[in-house]
Image: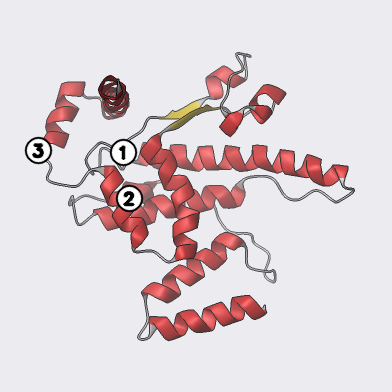
């Protein structure tokens, strides 16, 4: 029973790519079939294994959505969409339906610029933002019940992290296909303009990542960063 299911999943991903690229499914199959690049699931696993634990746990959330597929996710906050598992939109109202985003799974496709696309990056950014907004609304309801003030829930940071994850993954893939990093075509939300403020979680992730992967003595630099984080 698993083989037909896998076939349907692959076909859905191919159809989405074909539509985005203005090509037929057969043309997409030909392009992907000629590639010696690894399949996406293998590339993502290898890429994440090379990251620091903090970066891996943060980026995996967004990259797994691309690998496994997700949706449909709308941009509305009606009760059916807030309370459904994974915030999957099951509401057929006039606002929910046209705003839905679905990401077809790409885990079994080979790495290429047609797979690691600008459209995928935009969808990952939108889904991350929508997830964060819906989760923030529910979290603020629980905070209100405890008499606590509401927290910011606009999904801004989640959207930025999603784009950062895609850019980093796609850049790593350039060794497999000589093309541009299409994620660079997707604007990355700007950071909070305040001059003095604590670092947010995703900023700590990026600092930790670049410290551990650059410099003359990354091990020592990472220890210093960890000490700073631990002591505040």
At label 3, counting other C-alpha atoms closer than 10 Å, the crowd grade (few under 14, some 14-19, many 20 or more) is few
Q: Is residue 24 visible?
A: no
Where residue 97 sits, quadrant-wise, is top right
Q: Is residue 28 visible?
A: yes
Where residue 2 sits, quadrant-wise, is top left
Q: CA distance from mark 1 to mark 2?
A: 9 Å
Which residue shows up at 62% across the image and 19% down it? 95
> Mark on residue 122?
none
Which residue shows up at 12% across the image and 45% down it? 36
> Which secondary structure, mark 2?
helix
Q: Quadrant of the C terminus?
A: bottom right
Q: Quadrant of the N terminus?
A: top left
| Position above or below: 91 against 87 | above
Which residue shows up at 37% across the image and 48% down it? 183
At label 2, counting other C-alpha atoms closer than 10 Å, the crowd grade (few under 14, some 14-19, many 20 or more) is many
Which residue shows up at 54% across the image and 47% down it? 159
Locate residue 74, reporting x and y percent.
57, 27
Q: Earlier in the sequence, mark 1 or mark 2?
A: 2
Q: Is residue 120 left or right of residue 100?
A: left
| Residues at circles 1 and 2 in contact by the CB criterion of under 8 Å | yes
Q: Earlier in the sequence, mark 3 or mark 1?
A: 3
Residue underneath mark 3: 34
Depth check, mark 2 against mark 3: the one in front is 2
> Mark on residue 107?
1
> Which secondary structure, mark 1?
loop
Locate residue 41, reporting x and y percent.
30, 44
Locate residue 219, reporting x and y percent.
41, 82
| Residues at circles 2 and 3 in contact by the CB criterion of under 8 Å | no
> Mark on residue 44?
2
């Amino acid at each position: 029973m698993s083989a037909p299911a896998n076939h349907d999943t692959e076909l859905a991903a191919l159809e989405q790519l074909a539509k985005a690229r203005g090509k037929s499914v057969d043309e997409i199959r030909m392009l992907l079939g000629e590639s010696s690049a690894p399949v996406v699931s293998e590339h993502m696993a290898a890429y994440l294994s090379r990251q620091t634990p903090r970066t891996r746990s943060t980026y995996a959330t967004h990259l797994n959505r691309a690998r496994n597929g997700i949706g449909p996710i709308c941009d509305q906050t009606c009760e059916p969409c807030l309370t459904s598992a994974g915030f999957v939109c099951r509401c057929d109202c006039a606002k929910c339906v046209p705003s839905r985003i679905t990401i077809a799974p790409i885990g079994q496709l080979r790495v290429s610029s047609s797979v690691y696309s600008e459209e995928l990056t935009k969808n990952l950014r939108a889904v991350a933002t929508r997830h964060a907004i819906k989760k923030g609304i529910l979290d603020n309801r629980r905070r209100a019940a405890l008499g606590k003030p509401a927290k910011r829930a606009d999904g801004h940071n989640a959207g930025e992290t999603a784009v950062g994850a895609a850019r980093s993954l796609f850049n790593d893939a350039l060794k497999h296909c000589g093309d541009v990093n299409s994620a660079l075509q997707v604007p990355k939300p700007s950071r909070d303009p305040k001059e003095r403020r604590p670092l947010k979680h995703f900023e700590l992730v990026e600092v930790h990542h670049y410290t551990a992967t650059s410099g003359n003595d990354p091990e020592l630099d990472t220890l210093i960063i960890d000490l700073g984080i631990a002591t505040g």
